[in-house]
Amino acid sequence: MKINHRITYPSSKKIYIKGKIHDIQVGMREITLSDTISVENGQHKAEKNKSVIVYDTSGNYSDKDITIDISKGLRRIREKWIEARADTEILPAFSSDYCNERLDDSNLDDIRFPLISLPKKAKKGKAITQMYYARQGIITPEMEYVAIRENIQNEELGIPTHITPEFVRDEIAAGRAVLPANINHPEAEPMIIGTNFLVKVNTNIGNSALSSGIDEEVEKAVWSCKWGGDTLMDLSTGENIHETREWIVRNTPVPVGTVPLYQTLEKVDGKIADLTWEIYRDTLIEQCEQGVDYFTIHAGLLKAHLPLVKGRTTGIVSRGGSIIANWMTQHNQENLFYTHFEDICLILNKYDVAVSLGDGLRPGSINDANDAAQFAELSVLGELTKIAWKHHVQVLIEGPGHVPMQKIKVNMDEQIAHCHGAPFYTLGPLTTDIAPGYDHITSAIGAAQIAWYGTAMICYVTPKEHLGLPDKEDVRAGVIAYKIAAHAADLAKEHPGAQVRDNALSKARFDFRWKDQFNLSLDPEKALEYYKIGRLGEESDHCTMCGPHFCAMKLTKEMHDCAKMNE
Amino acid sequence: MKINHRITYPSSKKIYIKGKIHDIQVGMREITLSDTISVENGQHKAEKNKSVIVYDTSGNYSDKDITIDISKGLRRIREKWIEARADTEILPAFSSDYCNERLDDSNLDDIRFPLISLPKKAKKGKAITQMYYARQGIITPEMEYVAIRENIQNEELGIPTHITPEFVRDEIAAGRAVLPANINHPEAEPMIIGTNFLVKVNTNIGNSALSSGIDEEVEKAVWSCKWGGDTLMDLSTGENIHETREWIVRNTPVPVGTVPLYQTLEKVDGKIADLTWEIYRDTLIEQCEQGVDYFTIHAGLLKAHLPLVKGRTTGIVSRGGSIIANWMTQHNQENLFYTHFEDICLILNKYDVAVSLGDGLRPGSINDANDAAQFAELSVLGELTKIAWKHHVQVLIEGPGHVPMQKIKVNMDEQIAHCHGAPFYTLGPLTTDIAPGYDHITSAIGAAQIAWYGTAMICYVTPKEHLGLPDKEDVRAGVIAYKIAAHAADLAKEHPGAQVRDNALSKARFDFRWKDQFNLSLDPEKALEYYKIGRLGEESDHCTMCGPHFCAMKLTKEMHDCAKMNE
């Protein structure tokens, strides 16, 4: 393990904001700026620029006072909060047969995460989800944490905000927001997904049978958090899924999601016909006890929907959807996730795992967008939402896919109409099919729009979409494209304080405070790299784009100076 | 000149579609596809896939039967059409003093384009613009050319279209569309810019005082056409602007635009106070006779607007705008482009150069979007449009800039309200300020939206925006991002035939016809490059993204096969 996982950002320091209700410390990033220098009556004048505080997904990795050792995992910040509630217990052993088999297998000693903790579970008769607490009127430390975190500018700026701990509680109670918080993932810093909060970005990593090892996946996970990924899905489908996930969960400061079906299918050697409720159930428990925070479950795709797929250009493009569709066809039975949905909820609510209702019939091409198959499934997702909520299970609704711009809004409208306010979580949508190699862009265009319309979380797409498994640089490109889309939506929704960073960066730009401009940007390293190409000096009052005579900002300043002299 | 400028696209051939009214040959690109292979009752079945014809901006460069020699320039396809109209004459010499000085300077022999043709100009008393012809009810060869070109799918597909030569004529007559067609740029293939046509992409190239030579600029121009740039602005501000432009114009098969003010300022050594109407006038004539097809002129920024700029975060960010604002401030005089606007029109209409009314006050930051300064200028652009049209000069209206999503539509609405239907031509807009290094993405998000709302042409932004001069790879990244935005808008506007390419590509994807998928994409080389990373065989029925068990498309096919067996 020679990879250095430390995360640094230029001119930035980790700060912690204290809670008022609970004894909590909310990690944020403060970017320090240099002074604005102007000349007035021949005298240099320095004007201080207030530092800018930004939302920070990098967890322990960016705190220089914390030693990073991925073989030990991150600090377990939520552990004492969970313990204080006294409604969970530590089990004497793992409950999943498969998990115990893996732990007993000495062949896996070399790749196993060395510090396995026994799992927690709700005490008998206790409800322990954030939704349950919220409904009881309880503001948990997790809720106060996100309330502080969402107010990205500290209070000194005096920007009015609707986001208080009580507001957070109310949104979770109503199902309009999800706070993924498996009691077995105490390393994760609380975050919230809901239309009345900052738009979040999910990133996908994970190996496939053809590539990628544990080291590489952990590195990608940390990398995703560095660039601002808010949640992380481990979509591994290759070897050693259990062990890979353990490393990822223990070292990821953001909620981790999975599609449990993928591992279940590996357990039956890829033979879809051999999938059973029992094996799936064991997999759910295995992952609940490892600390996965949310599961994508394709429970809304029914037998009755399959004929609707026939005329499609690209059939079923959801991996989970295509697997369960095949299972239904081979067995001529109803979707087992649908028939067992209540059983599933009764497992998830013992660990506070949220369900992300998968859209197995999302369109995979412009031609298939908004078709009967897609909307038939969406309406079932609405039914399932009610069932999950009955058991205090938090719910996300997954959305498309490939959708041309004029058909995007209808997706949001239909989701609102059918899903009772549960947060929408979409993959893109991609606004055209014709740009493989650039689908982070085709989809950022759609993601920005649907997030503006109300989607709470957007799932990134990398440049390798449709072509191969993303590497580290693809993860970076995907996360940044989606941070752009999410932030563009936050601005468009006029989220309190969202524009502070734009304003500070633009002022730095106008002042030729190049380093401040870069330090405030989403990717300071890339900006600096591009700036340095063909640059003469480090700081100057023009760049190679326009040269000295044609810099509009320089000319504006000269004009103002001239106008002042004329006054 | 060792650079190979030949443009090739995989599995593509140059085809020419004949005119019905005129003796014209419209170059298009035909992409040949392989068969769809399926198995039915144990028998392989091959189904033919129709080739796809796409809009082609690559001119002679992609016709293997035409020898490319950039020291000779491209074929002059419009020359005989212009001559046949018999309303222009070849001048005995260039009319610009500056041009003649440069031609007489033997120090420039080494860098001068070797084959200088004498310029054409309207005969005395003759109106020669496409707008004039259109108003007379004349369908020119240029108009029929674009009518054929806009029907991107050949007629065999039977997709109903509104675009006929008569429709083109009517749109130009009404000022709703611009067909840039300087009589001194006969190498340019006719194209049209208007809200009722395909959305067009402008690209900017050009050196600055700090970098880039002639070879490199010609290479970037050809490169822009390869990736689909519809027009090209030469924004050179460094040395040898006149000679650089000659090479570019002679070798560019798309309309070329400039900001004549840039060269004018170089002529007075960057001293803004020394700018005069006489020097500017000579520059206009110099460039009209070289063959520039449209000029950006910042004639709408008035003295009265300058106080509105004061509270801005980023002042004036248009280079031309800041120059003329400084000039007005220093001289305490009204904008000379405004006071001389009628004189300007009377020059431009002798060559059929279109005017692109520059938005000198476009916002350079989210905070400055849609402010009083911006809209005050827009309303003047509307006045100027009427004046230009009086002289049969074609008009484009330039637009912003930096605009958050919720404020984009108002820009289009205001433009429609004030500018009498003249086509809107916007730079982005960028939907956030916080992503230098990725502004091709921040702006593609805004460009796709504003194009959907009706903007006719979008000006690309490269990843180097705000940071430096774009190189060849930046040009490619910028053009592709904007081709995506333009195509996404064509789909959203339901432009006839636009979806044919998406459908063909998605069908290829579903069939695992990988090569067809790539060949149909906007950047086949990039798609293939990404696909090959970590690939085992050349063609397979899964990719590294999902591995063999998890390919949804493969599973869909298996399900359909299974369902068939069950029937």
Image (tube, coloured by chain):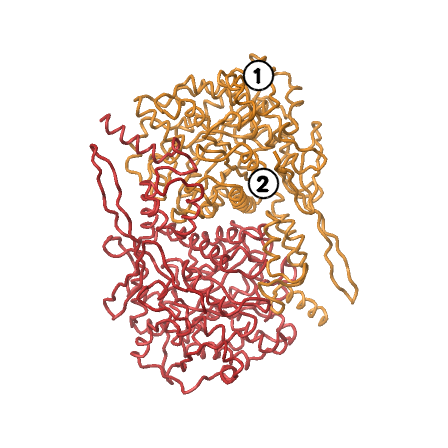
Chain colours: A orange, B red
The secondary structure type at the circle numbered 1 is: strand
Above or below: residue A53 compared with residue A506: above
The secondary structure type at the circle numbered 2 is: loop
In the image, residue B323 lies at what x, y percent?
Answer: 60, 70
Q: Residue at x 67, y 52 (%)?
A: A516
* Nearer-N-terminus badge (2/1): 1
What residue did someone put label 1 on? A122
Above or below: residue A352 compared with residue A520: above
Labelled pair 2, 1 in contact (Cβ < 8 Å): no
The mark lying in front, picked from 2 and 1, is 2
Inter-mark Cα distance, 2 to 1: 32 Å
Nearer the observer, A316 or B131: A316
Is disc 2 surrounded by few (<14), some (14 to 19) or many (20+) residues within 10 Å? Answer: many
Q: Is residue B176 left or right of residue B380?
A: left
Q: Residue furthest bottom?
A: B92
Q: Chain of mark 1?
A: A
In the image, residue A155 lies at what x, y percent?
Answer: 70, 40
Asked whether the viewer can see residue A19, the reply is yes
Residue type, numbered disc 1:
Ala
Quadrant in the picture for residue B62: bottom left
What residue did someone put label 2 on? A228
Nearer the observer, A170 or A380: A380
Of the 4 image quadrants, the one containing the N terminus of chain A is top right
Above or below: residue B203 compared with residue A297: below
Residue type, numbered disc 2:
Gly
Quadrant in the picture for residue A487: top right
Quadrant in the picture for residue B69: bottom left
Q: Residue at x 49, y 45 (%)?
A: A448
Asked whether the viewer can see residue B304, the reply is no
Q: Residue at x 55, y 76 (%)?
A: B264
